Image: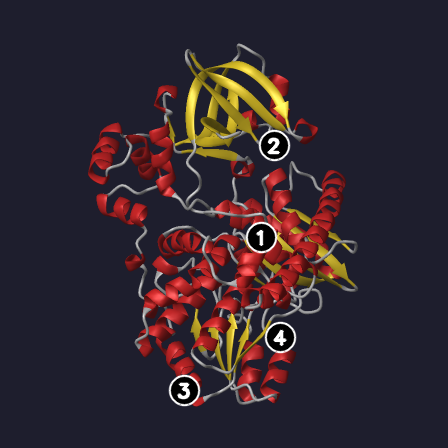
Amino acid sequence: MAPTKDLIWKLKPRDEAAEIELARAVGVHSLVAAVLRARGITTLQAARQFLEADLSSLRDPFELPDMRAAAERIVLAVGNGEPLLVHGDYDADGITATALLVRFLNKLGADVHYYIPHRLNEHYGLSSEALRAAIGKGIKLILAVDCGVSDNQAIAEAQRLGADVIVVDHHEPGPKLPDTIVVDPKRHDAEAASDDLAAVGLAYKVAAAICTLLELPLESLRRAFLDLVAIGTVADVVQLQGDNRIMVKHGLQLLAHTRKQGLQALMNISQISGELTTQDIAYRLAPRLNAVGRMGDASDAVDLLLADDPDLAMKLAVQLEAHNAARQREQSMIFADAMAMVSQEVDLENEPVIVLGSAKWHIGVVGIVASKVVDRFYRPAFLMCREQDTFRGSARSIEGFNVAEALASCSDLLTRHGGHALAGGFTLPVDNFDDFRQRLNEIARACMRPQQLKPSVNIDCEVDIEAIEPQLVECLWRMEPFGQGNPTPVLMTSNLEVVEVRCVGAEEAHLKLLAGEGHRVFDCIGFGMGQEASWLERGCRIDLAYTPEFNEFNGRTSLQLRLAALRPTTRQ
C-alpha cells in the first residue's frame, strides 16, 4: 500500500444551509444530509427513496428490452412441458443467477437442467459443444444467463439445430446483437436507469415478469430469492444504487434467516452468524463461491445453492472451502511473481497500463491478482497465462479507462474478448503480445491524464471532531448497504493531535492511534497502514480521513475511527 499521505484528498464542497433544510425534511442528522448531498442526493424525494429503499420502488421488469417476449416464451415452454437448459457462468454472479432460475423454474414445475462451463477447460461464454449435446437430448429452450450477448455464432448454431435461445446478460453487446430474444440492460435501446444490474438481478427480473404474467404474488418471489440476489450483486461489484441497492438491502435481511440448506452451510463454514453486511458477502461468501469456479468445477457451487439435504450441503461447502484455500495459495504465488515482473519489465514512468503474462500462472486466479496489482499501482492491469500458442487473460481497471472499449479497440489482435468498464476477459495469440501491450498503452495515453494514475481518497465532508457522537454513527448506518457506488461514508477532520502511536497485528501490519483535540480523543485503527508509523510521533498534528464506527470488545462498545488516510497537518 502506498503511503496515504501521498494520496490526493478529494473533498466535496458543502452548503450548510441546504444540508440543514434537507436534514429537517427527511429527519436525519445534518451530517448525514451533507453526505447525501455530496453524493448527488439533493432533493427530498431522492433522499427518502434512497433511505427507505422500499421494494415498491423497484422498476417494472417489463421496462427492460425483450422482457415480455422472454417471459412469454418461458411460460409457453413450462406450459408445454418443454425441457429447458439454463446455461450460466462460472463466477459468483453467474452461479447465483443460474441457481435462482433453476429453483424458480422447478417451483413452476418445469423440466429444467443447467450447465456451467469449466473455466480451465473452456472459454467464457456459451459452449457450442454443451448446447449441441443438450439439444441432442431434447432441450427445446436455452436460457443464456450472464453470457450470450456476444455469442452470435453459438446461438445461430443452436437455432439451426431446432432450439430457441433467450439471452439474459448484462455485459456490453458487440456491434451486432444475436438474432434472438436479448434481455440486456446495456443494449443501446435500453433505458439508462437500469443499466447496471448484475446477472442475478436480471434473472430475478425475469422471474418477476413471469410471476406477473401468471398472476403469482411477488412477495413470495422476494422472500424466496432476494438472498441469492444480494450475494451475486455484491460479488459482481455493480453499483449499489437504484434497484441494486433495494434488492441487496432486503436480501441481506433475508440471508440471516434463509432456509436454503446450501446457504446455511456456506455461512456456517464462513463463520458468519446474525445479521449480514455487504462485507460478509464480499470477503467471506463470494470468495468461496468464486474459488470453486477458479480452481475446479463451478457446478459444485450451483449444486450447493440447490441442495435441500443438509449433509450434502455441508459436504459441498467443505469442498468450496478447500478450493478457496488452494486459491489463496496460488494467488500469493502469482502476486509475488507479478510484483517481480513489474519491477523488471514495466516502465511505470511511461507505461500507464501494466500488461504481464506467464506460462506458470493459473487462469482461474489471474483476475483476482490483476485486482491486487491495480490496488498496488493504481493503473489498469492485464494479466494472462500462456497455454501453448495462446494467452488467456483477465483485466481490471480504474476510473477513466474502460476495459470493454479498450479490448474492442484491440479486437484485431484478439481471438475473443468481453467485459465491463472495469473488468474483462480476453484471449490472444502469443505472437500478438507485444503489439497488444503497445496498443493498450497508446489507448491509455490518449484517454487518461497523468493525475488519473495517482490514487485518491474521496471525502464526503469535513467535520469538527466534536460532531463525532453515537447518534451520528447510527444515522450514517442508515445509508447501508455500502459498496460500489455507495461507499462507506468518509469524513475528514483537520489538525488533530497524536496522543499515542503503535502497530498491531501480524508483522505489525495495522496502525493504532489515539488522536483528537482536548478531551475529545478517539481510538483510531488503520488496517494495513502500519508503515505510516514511521513518520508519526506523539504530539504531532495530523489530518484524518476516516469512518466513525462502533467497536465491540470484551462486551464493551465504544466509538472508534476507521482510518482511510492520514497526512501531516498543512494548516494550523
203 is higher (above) or lower (below) than 46: below
Q: Which numbered disc, 4 or 1, marks the residue that appears first in the sequence?
A: 4
Mark 2: which amino acid? Gly
Disc 3 packing (10 Å; few <14; some 14–19; many ≥20): few
Quadrant in the picture for residue 459: top left
Q: Residue at x 60, y 58 (%)?
A: 289
- Whole-angstrom CA distance, mark 2 to mark 4, is 42 Å
Res 262 seen here: yes
Q: Which residue is identified by label 2? A: 528
Q: Which mark is residue 127?
A: 4
Q: Which numbered disc, 1 or 2, marks the residue that appears first in the sequence?
A: 1
Q: Which residue is identified by label 1? A: 268
Quadrant in the picture for residue 135: bottom right
Q: Position of residue 155 (x, y in %)?
A: 54, 79
Q: Which residue is identified by label 3? A: 79
> SS for tag 1?
helix
The mark closer to the camera, 4 or 1, is 1
Q: Position of residue 40 (x, y in %)?
A: 32, 42
Q: Residue at x 52, y 28 (%)?
A: 565
Q: Residue at x 31, y 33 (%)?
A: 34
Disc 1 packing (10 Å; few <14; some 14–19; many ≥20): few
